[in-house]
Amino acid sequence: MNEWSLSRRSMVKAMLLGSAAPWLLNSTALAGSCEDHVVRVAGIFAPDTMNPFASWNSFWPTSMTYDMLVGVDPQRHSDRRGFAREWSVADDNVTWTFKIWPGMKWSDGQPATAADAAFTYNYLRESIGTPNELNVGWNNTSGFENVESVKALDDETLQIVTKLPTRWPIDNFTLIVPAHIWKGVSHADARSTFRNDPPLVGTGPMIVQEFQQGQFAHFRPNPEFRTGQPATAGMIMTFFNAADPIAQGLKSGSLDYGLSLTVAQWDNLSKDPDIVVGQARTEQRNYLAFNTASGDGAGSTKALHDPAFRDAIGYAIDQKTLVDRAFRGHADPGVGLVVPLATDYYSDLSNIRRRFDLAEAGRRLDATGYRDTNGDGIREDKDGKSIQLELITGTGSGSLEIPLAAVQLISGWLGQIGISVSVTQLDSGALGARTAPPANGGGGWDLYIGASWLSPAPHDLLDMGSSKLIGTRNRAYWTNEKFDELLSEVDVTVDLKKSQELVDQAVRLIYTEAPYIVLCYPFVLEARRKDCFEGWGTQDIMSMWGYYPFDRLKPASLSTGEGKVE
């Protein structure tokens, strides 16, 4: 045991004494040095189960164990593939063929074939319309209404036939699970009580061996991984609800990689010669949502139901200043639902875009009947009640942290136009409960500053307005029949030009109705240490959509200059 091992252990303990995870002091999970070849990563994650059919919060760590059929990474990077090594669509635009890796195995040694992919998809399809429909987790029935059939033609060939032309077969993000594990799990159990306790069985490079909710996931390398067992000895993924212990761990050497860093932490770490920092655009949208619910879950004033009121508020928010001051330039100013990274669909909405103008916001509120009639500095709604709004906020699982400075700026601007705002900061669990569907006890708040991070696929770009996703992805509880029609048409459109036109119509509609004010599109701020491992990415140190680089990461060699000499 060398001096480095001892110092690293002591630094781990020092970090954790001031963190939100003192439980780890009694765990051997973080004890070690470069010599143990265990990769240590951390982020703001709050996975609650290893069952991908029952939760949205567990993409990390389950995506390290389970493959998607295709997913985002293989469409962006030629050297990354999922459960399928290649795919094609016939001239009819409805018959898709996927070639599965020959001889692939699950981590328990059982053959992993097209039959497992067919099972996963049909397991979801067969739940549609039943009381136990699998529509509450990452693996869900969205899009399956357009699927005619899913068949394994042989061990290496999967065929998906859709009812209408759609890119859904490659743009869905279902995690493929082993039929021999899941065939005995009922739909009722899959959407609720089944925990899928470790050790998991998957085809990814890292298999979840142990999971402690609110604490960590311990992975072992998959000896059956299709390109060979990864060169590392495993991985520890630590879950935090704030970025401070992540930055501390990177500085001390107790972490090898961290994301969800704040700007100040990233700037500080960039000066450390032992650390490499990175930033990249993501699909995250930070937004201000209005509670548009009526009846159960409604907010404190009917003004929240009025598009004119919401539109006026939009003029009181300066997205550029938010980016410059709260994010120090590490974000793009917000406009519509489509993120700049989705280059095929992004528009700056220049001909309808609101511009920051507090006086204009005030004029619009006056014109629509929201005035301060008693001179107390607070406007009244049309029922004569003072408009005093509760704003809830917090960082959801897997989302980049929203700076408090952004919340302060927004509440300050609203105060200047006579809208009183009180702020309630919540952790991920409480935030999920408050923004859940009103039928499940959610609601009662007025404004919500949150984030959404899904894929660049057209459906996911628009999902915040879907009436089918109220209380999950649609946190504003907003419903609009025309928007739903456009979204349904997007789902069955393959032609890019037509898809662009439909997305543009939908984005303009929801922008005008203003159930959300998009604040910004933040960059992921990440950092890694140089001393223990090599093989990290450059532009994206770690993939945001899969398990890269943990399939190819290896202990740093002394010859690279990144190894630890001690």
Image (cartoon, rainbow, N blue to C red):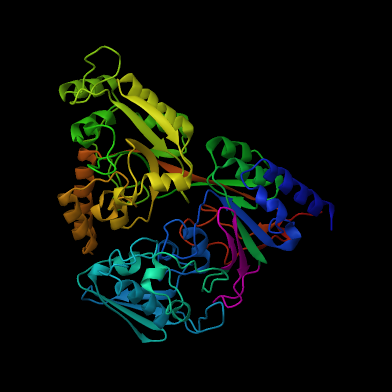
Q: Which residue corresponds to the image point at 52% horizontal and 78% vertical from the top-left?
A: 106
Residue projecting furthest to the top: 375
Q: Which residue corresponds to the image point at 31% horizontal and 24% vertical from the top-left?
A: 419
How many labels, in total?
A: 0
In which image quadrant can residue 388 be found?
Answer: top left
Q: Is residue 351 visible?
A: no
Name the spot of residue 119 as percent of width and height, x first: 38, 78
As rendered, which of 92 and 132 lies closer to the eye? 132
Position of 226 with respect to 417 (left or right) is right
Position of 513 with respect to 154 (left or right) is left
Q: Is residue 549 magenta?
A: no
Name the spot of residue 181 as percent of width and height, x first: 48, 78
Q: Which residue corresponds to the image point at 24% horizontal and 38% vertical from the top-left?
A: 514
Q: Is residue 215 magenta?
A: yes
Vertical position of residue 443 compared to residue 59: above or below: above
Magenta segment = 207-231
Name the spot of residue 14 as percent of width and height, x first: 73, 43
Name the spot of residue 252 as percent of width and height, x first: 71, 45
As rendered, which of 521 and 149 lies closer to the eye? 149
Q: Is residue 129 visible?
A: yes
Vertical position of residue 359 compared to residue 46: above or below: above
Q: Quadrant of the N terminus?
A: bottom right
Position of 546 with respect to 264 (left or right) is left
Vertical position of residue 125 compared to residue 393: above or below: below
As rendered, which of 388 and 450 lies closer to the eye? 388
Q: Quadrant of the C terminus?
A: bottom right
